[in-house]
Image (cartoon, rainbow, N blue to C red):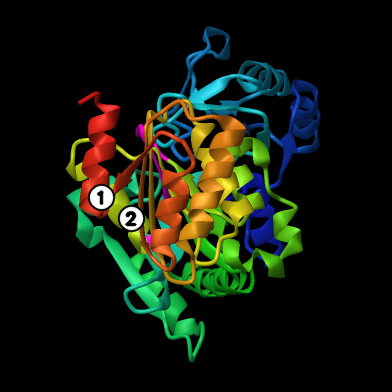
Amino acid sequence: MNIHEYQAKALLKSYGAPVAEGAAAMTPAEAEAAAKMLPGPLWVVKAQIHAGGRGKGKFKEAEAGEKGGVRLARSVAEVREFASQMLGNTLVTKQTGDQGKQVNRLYIEDGADIARELYLSVLVDRANGRVAFVCSTEGGMDIEAVAEETPEKIHTIHVDPAAGYAPYVGRKIAAALKLEGDQVKQCVKLMGQIYKAFTEKDMSLLEINPLIVTAQGNLHVLDAKVGFDNNALYRHPDIVDLRDLSEEDEKEIEASKYDLAYIALDGTIGCMVNGAGLAMSTMDIIKLYGAEPANFLDVGGGASKEKVTAAFKIITADPNVKGILVNIFGGIMKCDVIAEGVIAAVKEVGLKVPLVVRLEGTNVEKGKQILAQSGLDVIPADDLDDAAQKIVAAVQGK
């Protein structure tokens, strides 16, 4: 689960991190009121969407003006003008895709006097199971480009989970960022606050780009992107309350109601699979035969008939889906339950695209029999390779 920048900053501020004063705004009037509460004379008007690259983004609509999703205003009147242009219009960035995202919220923030821009992120390094600080002196830039062109400028510092955060970790980060004097002490303190927030709130990613050094020589969190581990949200009702459903795919929201692991993709073949590894293999083999998956969907190991029905309905709700591949290996999951769920869903929503079903494992013969006797136009498959070839051929009209 992701949250907006202003929410992330409020969370970090509650742990003592230095952030600028600011306020969220949903209307031009609220933006004007927020600006009047800040000292100025420089205000920053920031579009709040769950995507990076806002400053370099472009609005689709002409009335939004030529400037991007992060604008500097030098008067309260200009704050209101920018808010009027941005709210309700669609911002396209490198991370949104061509469809962009509608801007429904803004963050009005006090301007900062920037001397240096740095990069900092915290994540879980799966290679060694430790929390890692990733930092660079090249803040405010596309970190992927930095990693590709000048990888020596990116530094990774791990935290021993047994020892936890210690001041020496902060001093290592300060050295990597070429901080000096009192800035080192500030860095040691700030990294401790960030580590505490990351671990206590079960974050999956915390990115600050840029972390700045002000003209006065102080460290300051100028931007913040935070994502949380969905599996730990039951421990954090305060975080769940920050969820903005308007930023999420409607199909993914529906899937979460049934505890389905669903991610929308850009292809044309809908997939319903049990098990994350099998789901990824299914997507890979679809690509191998020249097509693209429309989604990742893992119904889990013990799905019920109702859960399978819901999964099928979510897939068919995607207008880009031109064919469906059901690939089930029954262990805990029983093949006859899958078959019954598919039949129930087809009877409820209809079947307007080719459907290939591959079943293997527990009660497989019973499942195949149920499908064969259903009267539905189902294309059976013997194995994954056979299933992938059949659904790609059906979608491509071969």
Counting from the top left corner in percent of width and height, residue 163 is at 49, 91
Label 2 crowding class (10 Å Cα cut-off): few <14, some 14-19, many 20+? some
Name which residue lies at 48% across and 33% down: 54
Counting from the top left corner in percent of width and height, residue 81 is at 67, 16
Counting from the top left corner in percent of width and height, residue 109 is at 66, 39
Name the one closer to the observer, 245 or 171: 245
- Magenta residue check for 334: no
Name which residue lies at 39% across and 60% down: 365
Which region is colored magenta?
265-276
User: Is the residue under label 2 in contact with that under label 1 (CB below 8 Å)?
Assistant: yes
Q: Is residue 388 left or right of residue 345?
A: left
Vertical order, 9 against 91 (above or below): below
Vertical order, 52 against 80 (above or below): below
Q: Which residue, given by chain and number where applicable, does mark 1 sit on?
A: 284
Which of the labelled discs sits on residue 184, or is there none?
none
Local SS, label 2: helix
